[in-house]
Image (spheres, rainbow, N blue to C red):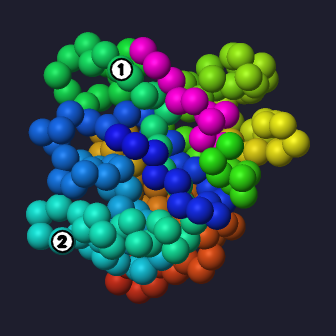
Amino acid sequence: MQPFLPRGSRILMLGSFPPPKTRWSMDFYYPNFRNDMWRIVGLVFFNQAGYFIQGNGYNRKLIESFCREKGLALYDAAVKVIRMTGNASDKYLEVVESIDLAGILDNLPMCSNVAVTGQKAAQTVLEVLAGTGFQQVLQLPAMGSFANFRYGERLVRLYRMPSTSRAYPMPLEKKVSYYRNLFKSFLGHSHSMVAGGLEDIS
């Protein structure tokens, strides 16, 4: 999948790698209908888990429009992988080629925040940062926290976020809390959970 890099983006979200196409409900990032990324974003900004849902899938046009408006760039930490089993689990992904993070940041001159969504994405990006072009060894941040790295004159924050896959054992309410704290700093207004919605447990 091609990187989605809206002009003026201030934050880059990196997943591990898309699931097999048989699991896609749209041709865009986080396409598996059982992945809760777009439900979480809907809850954070609109207090509606179904805001980006259309029929039995996600509304790509609405999601793209939202991301462009907010300056949210999307890509994956791995460009090529080998699946050691037939499922979508990150546990069985072997990364063959990692993201050209320097090249992506060159195309996002206003971006000083990178968020990795899940353990595999985090490990992959840490390996990239330790390699040629960056040569910076970072410790894995605590969940919801960040570590700094430099790219040229730019100081960039690397945020560790929970996986939005339902296979990751964290209540949806807690995931919403983590992502709200991330988004409210960079992407403008977000809703607090109100009666009938989700309680803010941050």
Residue 177: percent from left, percent from top = 53, 62
| Frontmost residue, 189 versus 2 | 2
Looking at the rendered structure, which numbered label has been put on residue 81? 1
Reply above or below: 148 against 128.
below
| Residue 99 on the magenta span | yes
Quarter of the picture holding the C terminus: bottom right
Left or right: residue 152 compared with residue 23: right
Looking at the rendered structure, which numbered label has been put on residue 54? 2
Looking at the rendered structure, which numbered label has been put on residue 144? none
Q: Amino acid at mark 1?
A: Val
Reply above or below: 126 against 1.
above
Q: Quadrant of residue 165?
A: top left
Furthest-bottom residue in view? 195
Q: Quadrant of residue 85?
A: top left
* 1 or 2: tag closer to the N-terminus: 2
Reply above or below: 61 against 132.
below
| Frontmost residue, 109 versus 33 | 109
Secondary structure found at label 2:
strand
Residue 86: percent from left, percent from top = 17, 22
For the residue carrying disc 2, how many other residues have a C-alpha within 10 Å: few (<14), some (14-19), or many (20+)? Answer: few
Residues at marks 1 and 2 touching, judged by CB atoms closer than 8 Å: no
Residue at image x 48%, y 76%? 45
**Residue bounds of the magenta highlight:** 96-105
Secondary structure found at label 1:
strand
Residue at image x 18%, y 71%? 54
Q: Quadrant of residue 190?
A: bottom right
Q: Amino acid at mark 2?
A: Gln
Reply above or below: 87 against 54.
above
Residue at image x 43%, y 34%? 16
